[in-house]
Image (spheres, helix red, strand yellow):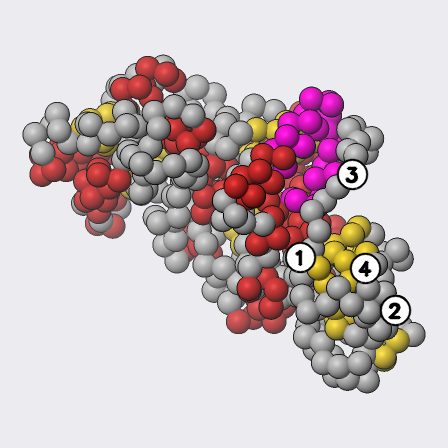
Amino acid sequence: MTDFIRLDTADNVITATAPLEAGAALEKIVTTGLVPRSHKVAAELISAGDAIRKYAQIIGYASEDIPAGAHVHTHNVEFRNVEGAYEFGTDLRHPNFVAEASRDTFMGYRRENGSVGTRNYIGILTSVNCSATAARMIASAFGPEELAQYPNVDGVVAFVHGTGCGMAGQGDGFDALQRVMWGYARHPNHAGIVMVGLGCEMNQIDWLLEMYGLKQGPLFHAMNIQDTDGLRKTIETGIARVREMLPEANKCVREPCPVSELTVALQCGGSDALSGVTANPALGYACDMLVSQGGTGVLAETPEIYGAEHLLTRRAITNETGQKLVDLIGWWEDYTERNKGSMDNNPSPGNKKGGLTTILEKSLGAAAKGGTTPLQGVYKYAEPVTSRGFTFMDSPGYDPASVTGQIASGCNLVAFTTGRGSAFGSKPAPCIKIATNTEMYNRLHEDMDVNAGTMLTENHSLAEKGQEIYDLLVSVGSGTQSKSEAQGLGDYEFVPWQIGATM
């Protein structure tokens, strides 16, 4: 491993792969001061106002003259909003599809409606914060001893949240919450659902049932505390209904299913400047492999593709698809402005410590998770993803809210890259975590499933690491526990995105 990498010949910065002292010789330059690992060094004189280029793209502008060899970061780089015309469909690299008869398989749960799950949970889903305690008490009644009698059931889990009332009964916020509830109620990783409300909330369960045509039956129940004579009786009723479900849920068994039934949420959090060098491109390679098998990858976090969206519109399968993505960018610019924020509020302090200077730099690395195949569809938050292949779902960059939307959209697996480290996990869709650097992987090895840092420390190729991630997705989809599952994560990461006013 060398002490630096240059990502493109058009770049005027290089990235340190190890901490550098003043006087370190890199290419034809010498560092003028200390440079932390994964931070940038000017490869030439960059005059004040000039564009700073990484990945052959603009990531910011010099706020002062930056001599060759100097540390390039927030102290001498300024952010500017993106501008420019968009191209649609000019970079369509179609995958080499594997013939259906030759496609890989995994061991999944095939549901009556034809969907396929990777886990077999019973979910307790709340319509409003007021029923959160009831849901948690219902779920907590089922301990390891009782569940051991049902080896095919992964658990009973409560999905509670802090909204559902004090909101408008129509509009973006209400619609998004209803889509989340529908997505979790119908998720293929659930064998059964008990839906619990208070009764007087704005987010009425009956409206959801009517709107989406949900019918109550042996594996789907709905109830309100006010109609069930109070909290205690609601909890007792919920427990009784879950006990009736368990034998039926246990009848579900894994069977061979084509990998085309995997829908993977492509996520990142706690990123560093190596995210776009190792883990994200490796996940992108795995996504391309999945797409070639007929599967689906779902990229999200709209603020974290800001500055890279032009690369995605070039991959849009139609002009309409590309324009949907452009319209989302415009919505987010307006959303941040009217809330007196900035698109550059992201990266976070931890991201900056890891060498990410602007949202443009972060986005260019984050977009690599989506691989290289055509963009087949752009979806609202928690909207069902109906296209196969590489797709995009609108969401904030806040990981729990984003993943909640991806799971509601139908993702039955989550792949999560991280450079600073993350303790994230999710239910009902299991999450694998991919480290960008070996140093962090060694410190947090109990939390990390894959070390993409070996692409630098052991010269592992992009193809090797991408294959490793793909193989792990198939294995976890077949029932192998991920590190986050083994640690019990996922009970508190259900966070529907709250859009609009709380009243």
* 294, 355: nearer the viewer: 355
Three-letter code, disc 3: Gly
Relative vertical location of residue 118 with respect to residue 209 in this rendering, above or below:
below
Q: Which of disc 1 and disc 3 is earlier in sequence?
A: 3
User: Residue 295's image quarter?
Assistant: top right
Q: Position of residue 114 (x, y in %)?
A: 47, 21
Q: Is residue 269 visible?
A: yes
Q: Find the distance from the CA under tag 1 to the CA under tag 2.
A: 20 Å
Residue that numbered label 4 is attached to: 49
Three-letter code, disc 1: Thr
User: Residue 457's image quarter?
Assistant: bottom right
Residue 309 falls inside the magenta stretch: yes
Relative vertical location of residue 214 with respect to residue 188 in this rendering, above or below:
above
* 45, 462: nearer the viewer: 45
Relative vertical location of residue 34 with respect to residue 106 in this rendering, above or below:
below
Residue that numbered label 1 is attached to: 358
* Local SS, label 1: loop
User: Residue 4's image quarter?
Assistant: bottom right
- Disc number at residue 84? 3
